Image (cartoon, rainbow, N blue to C red):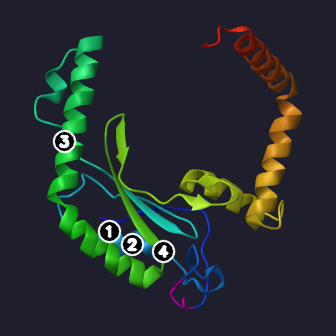
């Protein structure tokens, strides 16, 4: 089972343990082989194929495809049938999470020691995906890995000098391209405030 890795950022050098808010980023070891290492370390039979492994400065997220519940293909393609499939998938993912918890914790500890990043898990069956506990890192606000990867891409490409600079750049871009929508939103908020002041008051 070979792994597939989506890389948001990887560092070089040796880590020196966690500092405030995580490991010192300038000392992070490289994680190019994280997908291969995890694929070799994961027990056979957990997933139906290679897991998706996404890496950034703080976190490694491992999401694997589980086998669909028995009889899933026999459910009709109606709204009720789709709801039943989604419920069955959610139940199978919940069972996987409970049954593999101890071993996942052990694998995560090993990976965290090797790569000096937190490890989070997720599972997927068809269109149903559930991420287990994932990190939310302060970057002028609390962002999860997909948003952090966007910021790191802007930094790595030279568009921005830092994550905070990238976040400011993204906010400016949204403001430039959504000015009309933002104006309507501000007007709606002002109307809500006006209606609130006209509302009944308690004596």
Relative to 141, say whether 74 is above or below: above
Provide the secondary structure element on which disc 3 rests: helix
Mark 4 or 1: in front is: 4
* Residue 117 x %, y %: 48, 74
Task: Look at the numbered discs 1 and 3 and tell me whether their residues touch, using CB distance below 8 Å.
Answer: no
Q: Quadrant of residue 86?
A: top left
Structural crowding at the residue carrying mark 2, measured as other residues with C-alpha within 10 Å and reported as few (<14), some (14–19) or many (≥20): some
Q: Residue at x 61, y 85 (%)?
A: 12
Q: Which residue is mark 4?
A: 117
Look at the magenta stretch and give its main secondary structure: loop
* Residue 21 x %, y %: 57, 73
Real-space CA distance between mark 2 and mark 1, rounded to the nearest whole angstrom: 5 Å
Dot placed on the residue nearer the N-terminal end, 1 or 3 = 1
Image: magenta residue range:
14-18
Dot placed on the residue nearer the N-terminal end, 4 or 2 = 2
Q: Is residue 89 visible?
A: yes
Q: Is residue 78 visible?
A: no
Q: Which residue is mark 2?
A: 36
Real-space CA distance between mark 1 and mark 3, rounded to the nearest whole angstrom: 21 Å
Task: Look at the numbered discs 4 and 1 and tell me whether their residues touch, using CB distance below 8 Å.
Answer: no
Provide the secondary structure element on which disc 4 rests: loop
Real-space CA distance between mark 4 and mark 1, rounded to the nearest whole angstrom: 17 Å
Mark 3 or 2: in front is: 3
Farthest residue toward the left? 70
Real-space CA distance between mark 4 and mark 2, rounded to the nearest whole angstrom: 16 Å
Q: Which residue is mark 1?
A: 39
């Amino acid at each position: 089972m070979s792994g597939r890795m989506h890389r948001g950022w990887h560092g070089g050098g040796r880590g020196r343990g966690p500092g405030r808010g995580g490991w010192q980023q300038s000392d992070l070891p490289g994680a190019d082989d994280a997908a291969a290492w995890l694929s070799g370390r994961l027990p056979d039979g957990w997933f139906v194929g290679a897991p998706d492994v996404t890496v950034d400065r703080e976190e490694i997220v491992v999401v694997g495809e589980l086998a669909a519940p028995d009889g899933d293909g026999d459910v009709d393609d109606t709204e009720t049938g789709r709801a039943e499939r989604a419920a069955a998938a959610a139940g199978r993912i919940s069972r996987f999470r409970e049954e593999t918890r101890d071993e996942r914790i052990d694998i995560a500890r090993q990976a965290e020691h090797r790569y000096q990043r937190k490890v989070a898990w997720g599972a997927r069956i068809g269109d149903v995906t559930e991420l287990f506990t994932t990190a939310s890192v302060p970057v002028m606000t609390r962002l999860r890995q997909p948003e952090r990867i966007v910021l790191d891409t802007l930094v790595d490409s030279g568009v921005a000098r830092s994550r905070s600079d990238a976040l400011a750049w993204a906010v400016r871009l949204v403001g430039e391209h959504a000015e009309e929508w933002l104006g309507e939103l501000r007007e709606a908020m002002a109307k809500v405030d006006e209606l609130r002041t006209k509302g009944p008051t308690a004596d």
